[in-house]
Every structure is written in structure tokens, then in C-alpha cells.
Amino acid sequence: MSVSGGQAVNGRHSSSLEPRDFYQLKQRAAEYYRSNAVPQRMQQVLNTMFYEKPDDMYGHLSVCFAAMSNCCSDPNYTTQDTGNNDNEEKAQSVNIALEWVNEPLNSLLKGLFPANQIHVDKLLSEYFQRKVEEDEEQTKKDNEEEKLTEPESLPPPVSAAFGDKKKKSPKAKKSLVIEKNINPREPPESFFPGSVAIGAVSLAIAKAAARLQNIILYLHIASLNQAEEPRKEMSMPLPLITILECGKSSGGKVHLLKEVIAIPKPGLGYKQSIKMIRDLQQEISKWMFAPKTGPAAISQSGCWMKGYDRIDQPFEMIQEVCTALQLTLGDDVHLMLNCGAHELMDYEKQRYEVITGVLKHPDEMIEFYINLVKQYPSIIGLIDPLRKEDVEQWSKLCSLLSPQCYILADAASRSIDKLLTEGLGAKLYSGLVVKHANQTTISNLIQVAKLMEENECIFISGLTDEETMDDSMADIAVGLGARFIKLGGLCHGERVAKYNRLLAIEEELAQRGTLGKSPEHEFPVIGAEQEDLNPEMILSN
């Protein structure tokens, strides 16, 4: 991104600027566009347009830009509100959260001792629950008032052609072939404005308690997590580092691979692991700029995003990159795939669109994944391979693949509130990606970690969509004994800050002599005894 040398800037022609001033101007321009994600968004729009090939190219661009734009202040310019509701809701939620923190929560917690985390979190949760109940009561009252003001509607007329509908038999005959329908989509869990204040204050209390006791945050969280004497050794969570995005938003035909994630070999220190993946990322960069490789961009996840036409292409590229670095794929480094299946379902056709034009029923996805893991044995994990509604298919997939592959739920997982009130339910996955977000308190995270440990469910600490420079997530993951930590790629300051914190924690533990060894990969076998499918039969297809 650069500023052309022949354009006027603030009334001055750029050619009249000194070389140093012009360089600084270009740097500011590049930072301005980069901070607003302009290159990434432009790349996504152009990639998508290339494959869609619309007749009205500029009309297509105008629709895309309108969807990304904010409300324009120019009264002569109007556009439909197509993409800004989420931003407005987030801004409103932040304002409400600030109001809660500045007044009611400040008064509620005044004079309390921060070390009593359980008591403080109980007060925070009770306050939040009261707010939810008040909102529900107000909504109920508003609905009743609307019913009173609405005019009575007449019943719909009885159609005289009711009998004729039965006579329209051509389409009805097709229904004689009974097709297994997919489970309907569950309604999304409601987001309560201001809820972020509860989680943020809970974390602030934990930080304050650690500082008052003059101990490090991860040690404080570990002491809260252990009812008895804290463990003498602490293991570092294995990093799940995203090295490539080639999913639905990449502009390619392949939709399935939302994230391709590298997992360093257990036993490597963080310094070695991150250096190895950084070298891997740099080698991948050479491929991105090679001739005839197509457009690519750095994604919000901090890695390269590139569209592919065939599902084997990214795996072949990673294999060649590992060979160039003298790394053994499947030994020095393994792969995990974030499939993002909930984004791939075509609800009209009741099929997953894994590749453009390639549609598969949830039952067919089982064979698809088994063959994929068989073809690429370096794959040892699948995140969100199915929607959470596909319960039967989750069970079958786990029965067949769990002995050799982690089957993990992120978007397909229940919320932390539901996990605490309803439990883990039927064991349909090896582990869950758990995030500290919204009304989740530190005590909630501790309860969930214990619940998962009791049920032999792998605890994975994950990032929320809203990234910040705060690195407390690293302390939380170590303190709670997470098996993995999922931070995305090695780019962007928000993610790098957390990787740097993990490096510092590992060094501190090593200096104290309390750094535990990371265990080898162990895949919990799920539901094998109740599965009636024969894996050999599927693998032989």
C-alpha cells in the first residue's frame, strides 16, 4: 500500500515533500489502511468476484462495499443498512458495560477482599441474573401492551381450491422416496448487552488478588483451581498455531478448511516450537508469492489466507514446505483442521457444501472425514467437523475416528452457562474449546475445567472474536491446566502478545524447577462399544 508521488496531500503536492516526510506519509497511509483491514477486505471481495464472475462487475462491487460501509454522514448519500447492526450492538453493549462498572458494580464490590474470588463471582453472577430477569419482565410487559393495541385480525378465508391441492400429484409422488431430513438449526443463544462487564470485572479481581499476594496470575488461578495443595509441576499447553486459511471466505472452491493448524511435537519447548512454526510460515510465504499461485492475503487470524480449487492442494504445499525445512510431517509437526461445518450447511438442500458444487449429507460427511484422515495421517484433530445439531453423526464419527484423531467442538459446543447447568451431556467429542467471554467469570472457568477433567474431556483454551492486547489468557490456560491453547497465527500484535506471555511463563517455570513435561498425544476412545458401523468397510471404499 503506497501513496502515489504525484497526488496532492492536504493542499501540498507530494512531489514537494522531502524524501523523509514522503516516506513517513507512506508509512502512515499503510498503517491507516492496515489498521482498518482494507487490504484483506479488498482481497476477499476481488477473490470472490473472480469465481462468481458477475455480469455487472461494478454493480457487484457496489453491493459489497455497501455491506462493509458505515452509515454515511452525507445527507445526499443513502444506502441500505446491510452490515452495521452488529457493530452498533457491540458499541451499545460496551457503553452499557461501562455504566455497570462505573456505578452498580463499583458499589456492589466496594470493600470486598479480592482474594475471595468465589464470593465476588457469585455477586457478579447474581447481579447479571437480576438484569436478565428484569429485561425478560420488561419484554413480556411490552408484548402484552402490543397485543392490546393490535386490531383483531380476521381468520383467513377457507380456500375453495383445497381439494385441488391434493390433485396436484406430480410433486407429491416424489415424496414417496423418503429422504432422511437433517435436524433443524437450533436458535442462536441470546447475547445480553453489557454482559462483557461481568467477565472483565471477574478477571480484574483475580489480577488484583494476585498482585496483593505478590504472586503471578497463573499461580493464583492454579491455587483457586486446586481445592487441595497445588500441583508441584505445571505443564505448558500445546499451541495450536494456524498456518493457513482456505475456507469459504478465501474465495476458492474449497470451503471445508476454515483453518489449517500446526501442532508442534510434544516435548519441544515453546521457543523451539514457535521458531519451527515461524520458519514454516516464512516458507509458506514464498509459495504465496510464487508465479501463478493466485491471490493471497493475511487473514484476521494472523496467517495466510488463500483460495484453492482442490482439497489436496494445501496439504501438498505443506508437505513440500516441511520437506524443504527437513521436517517430518506427522512426527515433528502434526495438523489439525478447523472445518467450521456450521458455516457450510445449505439448509434448502440440506447438504454441506464442502467444495463449490459438491454437496454432502451429514451421513456422507463421516466417510468423507475418514478417507481424509486416511489419506493424510498427519491430521490428528478435527474442530467442528459437523453442526452441533447432527448428534447422531457426531456419535458415529467419534466411534470411528476418536482412537486416532481428536474430535473437538468449538462453535458446536454448548455455552459455558449451559455446560454448568446441564452438564456435558452425551459424550460426542474428545474436547471443547473454552473461551473467557461475556458473563463468564473466573469461577465459571474453574468449574468447567473441573467438570471436563472429571469426564475425561480435553480442555482447550481459545480466543474470542474480539481480540485485545491483554495476555491474561495465557495465564488462565496454564493455571487451569489446559491441554491445548488456540491463539491463531503468528501475526498481529494481539496474538503475538499472548505467545510472548507463554514464552515468559515457560521460562519462569523452568527457572523455578516446576516445569512439567508435556505428555504425548493420547486419543480418548469415544462410544466404540455402541457403534454398529464397520470402520474397515468405510476405509476400504
Image (cartoon, rainbow, N blue to C red):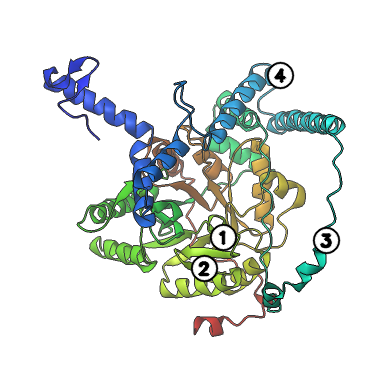
CA separation, marks 4 and 1? 45 Å
Residue 217 spot, x, y in % from top left: 54, 34
Q: Mark 1 or mark 3: which is in front?
A: 3
Instruction: Name the foreground residue: 432 vs 258.
Output: 258
- The residue labelled by disc 3 is 160
Q: Is residue 110 above or below residue 128?
A: above
Q: Which of marks 1 and 2 is nearer the N terminus?
A: 1
Label 3 secondary element: loop
User: How crowded is the residue under tag 1: few (<14 C-alpha within 10 Å), some, or many (20+)?
Assistant: few
Say the numbered circle drawn on residue 478.
Answer: none
**Sequence order check, earlier mark of 4 and 3:** 4
Which-is-in-front pick, marks 4 and 3?
3
- Badge 2, how many Cα within 10 Å: few under 14, some, many 20+? some
Q: Which quadrant holds residue 221?
A: top right
In front here: 232 or 377? 377
x and y percentages locating residue 297 in the rendered image:
32, 47
Q: How many labels does the image show?
A: 4
Tag 1 residue = 346
Amino acid found under the numbered disc labelled 1: Asp
What residue is drawn where x is 37% and y is 38%?
A: 492
Residue at the spot of label 4: 104
